[in-house]
Each structure stands twice: as structure tokens, then as C-alpha cells.
Image (cartoon, rainbow, N blue to C red):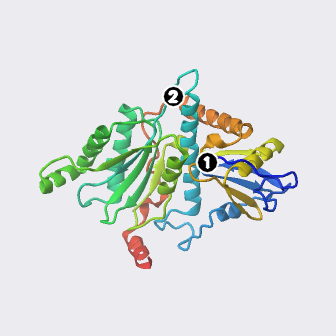
Amino acid sequence: MKRQPQMSLESPRFCKPTRQQIIDSNIQYLRVYQNYAVIFKEHVTKQSEKQIENITESNKQGRKYNGYMSYNTKSKIRKIIDAWLTGIERYNKAGQGKFKKEKRKPVFVTLTLPYEQFHSDYDIKRKILVPYIQELIKYYNVRYYFWRAEAQKNGNIHFHLIIDSYIHKDIITDTWNRALNKLHYIDAFESKHGHRNPPSTQIQSIAQNSNIISYIIKYSTKHEEGRIILGRIWGCSDELRNLNCYTEIIDNEKTNALNDLIASYDCRIVNEEHFTVIYFPQNFQIDGIPKTLLSSINKYYSSLYSQLYDRPMVKYPTNTLDENTEDITLKEVHELCLTR
């Protein structure tokens, strides 16, 4: 809930009352995410970006595949999903005005195996997941996708999939079950349960809401649990790989807008040597950002959306499983499991 600013003329700008001023003249640029913003000062390094979330990787083994998602990978995925879904959200929001536009309705889908896994992770991805995504693109208006593989507690591989088109849950399930039976998982389920309709999918609409988008981002980059997945653990459309969130050099106008934002909302601020993080309050919506800054954000995402969707459609996913780590040996996996 918005509250009235309580700043006096003597109060330092760009901070809540009674706090020290948190930024100085060395600001370089601003990056805005769904639930927080980062102000980078000069001499920004990869290390300073890493410190933002205080992530440590105790399992680093150089460039050798280790079954974990690295910090750099999590950061890349976070930017991809945040920029992509925010672009759709901003486009849909703009479409509520005088000129109605066709809205994209992204969904978050969970795909599971209905029977104990009896093929390798490689086969499941290549012979079930890839054809499934291809069918969604070909017949159900899916333009772009992101997927993440994880192991369930029972050891089966399962997938989380984000697509940019709403599809009825029955179609999602029927299409996935057909793909599953290419390796006879529906046949195996029927032999045990006497029918061919396992509850192998879950679907959740991604409402145009920053909290839902933030939840999806957090879920898609969470720490791995269970056994190691062989080969690639995530993939997306090629066009999404280089997306980034709104990032721009700060000028006086944007500084004043940020001052107003912090003064008006219960923002949590973390100030470090090379950057400052402004955490927006729970249930905060991007439209709560002052108009002088919001107009720049909307312009950026309008351009991003146009670059993604105002281009010829590629009918089939490419490089979905193009991964240098596919040649990991079972011996290496066994050694990694022993070290866990």
C-alpha cells in the first residue's frame, strides 16, 4: 500500500527518512527487475554483480560439468525469464487501452513421468521433450519456450516448461501423454493401473502480476535437489538467449524518480561499495514506479516485444539440447554422487 512521503528539506535524497544517503555521484547505470532494482556504480565487475545475491558455489570444479546450475547460469536464466515475461506483461497492459491487441497468455507447465523411469535422461529429453515442444509450436500458437529439468524424489526426471500461449489443460496432458508413449510410458502405466490417463501434467497461468513472475523465476533457478540430471538441465528458444532486463544510464530525472519511489514505498535497501539494491515491497507492481521512469521502462519492453514477435516464426525449436556436457560418463556421475 502506498504511503505518503515524510521527507523534509533537510532529509537526504534517495533514501528513507533518517537513513544516510545511499548513493553518490559515481552511479553508472540502473537495472530494474520484477521485484527489485540494482544501481551499479563505476568500476562494476562480475564479482560485484555476484555479490548482489550473496551466492556461493561450494561445488565449483572449474568448467567441468558437475550437475549443478552455476551462478552465471542462474543469473542468465533470471534475466531471460524476467525480460521475456515482463515484455509480455507490459505489452498486454498497453493493449487494454483504446486499441485492443492480441494478448499473449504465458503458462507454467510441469511435466512428469507416470511410471518408473526406464530410459536415460538423454532419451527422455530427445525423444519425448523435444517432439512435445515441436508439436506445441506447430499446432498451438507457441512462439517461445523455456524448460528446466529436475529429478523428483522418486528419481524420475521431470520438467518445468514456460510457454507463451495458453493451451487448455486437457490438450497439454493429451499431447504430453502421446509423447510419453513413444517410449511406452503410457503402456507401462496402463499395465499397472488399468487405464491410459495418468495425471502427468500440471498447468498454471502466469497472471500479469509481478509476484507470479517473481515466483516463476525463483522456481526456475532454485537449487538442485535429488540425483544429478545427465546432460543439459535447461534450454530455451534461441531468440530468448540474449534478453536482458531494462538497463539504462541514470540521469537526474531518473534519480529523482527513484528518490520518490523509495520515499513512497516500504523498500528495503542494501548498500554496498559498487552497487545498491532496492527491494520492492511484497505485492509491488511495476506501475507503481514514478511515471518519468516508467515511461522509459515501457518503451524498452515495447521494443523488446516487437523484436521477439514482429518477426517470421520459426516452426521448430533449434539447439534445444546442444550441450557440450552430454558426453559425461556414468563413472563421473557416480563419483559426483559420492561427493554429495
Tag 2: residue type?
Answer: Pro
**Residue drawn at (40%, 74%) of the image:** 337
Tag 1: residue type?
Answer: Met
**Residue drawn at (61%, 36%) of the image:** 304
Q: Which of marks 2 and 1 precedes in the sequence?
A: 1
Residue 303: x percent and y percent? 64, 33
Q: Is residue 280 above or below residue 311?
A: below
Residue 191: tell me if it is visible.
yes
Residue 241: tell me if it is visible.
no
**Residue drawn at (37%, 33%) of the image:** 140
Residue 225: x percent and y percent? 42, 67
Please tell me whether mark 2 sits on a helix, a strand or a loop.
loop
Q: Is residue 322 above or below residue 312?
A: below
Label 1, residues with CA under 10 Å away: few <14, some 14-19, many ≥20: few
Which of 85 and 15 lies nearest the eye of the viewer?
15
Which of 31 and 94 lies nearest the eye of the viewer?
94
Going by the picture, which residue comes out furthest to the right? 10
* Residue under numbered circle 2: 312
For the image, the number of numbered tags is 2
**Residue 287 left/right relative to 198:** right
Quadrant of the frame with the C terminus: bottom left
Label 2, residues with CA under 10 Å away: few <14, some 14-19, many ≥20: few
**Residue drawn at (62%, 37%) of the image:** 301
Q: Alpha-carbon distance for marks 1 and 2?
A: 43 Å
Residue 173: x percent and y percent? 29, 43
Which of 332 and 74 lies nearest the eye of the viewer?
74
**Residue 285 left/right relative to 325:** right
* Residue under numbered circle 1: 1
